[in-house]
Amino acid sequence: RLASMILWGPPGTGKTTIARLLAMAAGYEFMALSAVFSGVADLKKAFEQAKVRRSAGQATLLFVDEIHRFNRAQQDGFLPFVEAGVVTLVGATTENPSFELNGALLSRSQVFVLRRLDEAAMEQLLARAEAFEGRPLPLTPQARQVLPAMADGDGRYLLTLAEALFLQDPPEPLDSAALGLALQKRSPAYDKDREEHYNLISALHKSIRGSDPDAALRTTPREYRELA
C-alpha cells in the first residue's frame, strides 16, 4: 500500500520513472498530469475517473509533474481526495516544497529528496544506451569519461548527448577535444528568483569567507554543490 509523497530533486534524476515503477509494483493504475498544462477541469476529471476505479477495487496513483506550479487553491483541491484515499498522490518538483507547497498538503505527504546521479549511475545509463543501439559510443576511453561530467548528474541530458553522438556517427572515435566541439557546452543551471540563485550566492559567500578570490570569481554549479 502506497502513501502520498513528494519527490523533490533536479531535472533528470528519475522522478517520473520512480512514480511509474511504484504504480507497477503496487498494482495501481498510473495517471499523469502536468501542472504546466493542466487546470481545474483536468483535476476534476482525474478524480472522477479515480472514484470509478476505486468502486471497482482498483487503486489510482496520480502523478503530478511540476506540482509547485499549481496555485494554493488548486493544491488545496487535492486534500479531500488524498484524505479519502481516492488517489495516492505522487508530486514531482524541482523547487523546495517547504516554500512552494501548502503546509496542509505537505502534512499528508512524505517528502523524498533526490540527488543528482553519481558516476556509477551515469555509466549504467550509457551502458544501457549502447546495449539498446547494439554498438559502442563513438568515443575514445578518455572522451567517454568526460561525457558524464558534461551532463552534470542529469540522466535525461546524458541520454540526449548519447543520442546525438549515435546520430552523428563519426567515422573515427572522438577524443575529448572533438567531443566538446561536437556537443558544445551546456549552459549552467541558473534561475534568478529561485533556489539555484540562492545556492550560487551561498557558494560565493563561502568562497569569499575562505579567502579564495579565484573561486569567488569562477564558482560553477558543480562547485557550489560541493561547497554547500
Image: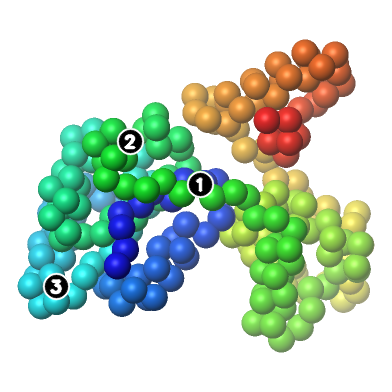
Q: Residue at x 26, y 50 (%)?
A: 38
Q: Amino acid at mark 2?
A: Leu
Classify mark 1: helix, strand or loop. Answer: strand
Point out the image quarter for the C terminus.
top right
Q: Amino acid at mark 3?
A: Arg
Amino acid found under the numbered disc labelled 1: Val
Dot 1, crowdedness within 10 Å: few (<14), some or many (≥20)?
few
The residue that label 3 is drawn on is: 53
| Residue positioned most to the front | 1
Q: Secondary structure at mark 3?
A: helix
Q: Sequence order check: which comes first, mark 1 or mark 3?
A: 3
The correct choice, above or below, for 6 with respect to 148 in the image is above
- Give the residue drawn at x 34%, y 55%: 90
Query: Looking at this view, is 76 or 45 the one in front?
Result: 76
x then y, percent, for residue 163 = 67, 68
Which disc number belongs to residue 113? Answer: 1
Tags 1 and 3 touching, CB below 8 Å? no
What residue sits 87% from the left and 76% below the top?
Answer: 171
In this view, the mark in front (1 or 2): 1
> Which of labels 1 and 3 is toward the front?
1
Q: Secondary structure at mark 2?
A: loop
Give the left or right position of residue 36, taking residue 133 as reference.
left
* Residue 120: % across, % down: 73, 63
Q: Cα distance, mark 3 to mark 2?
A: 28 Å
Compared with residue 151, is residue 59 higher up or lower down, i.e. above or below? below
The CA span between labels 1 and 3 is 30 Å
Look at mark 2 in the image and give the residue it sits on: 101
Where is residue 220, by image quadrant? top right
**Is residue 49 at all visible to an observer of this figure?**
no
Discs 1, 2 touching: Cβ within 8 Å: no
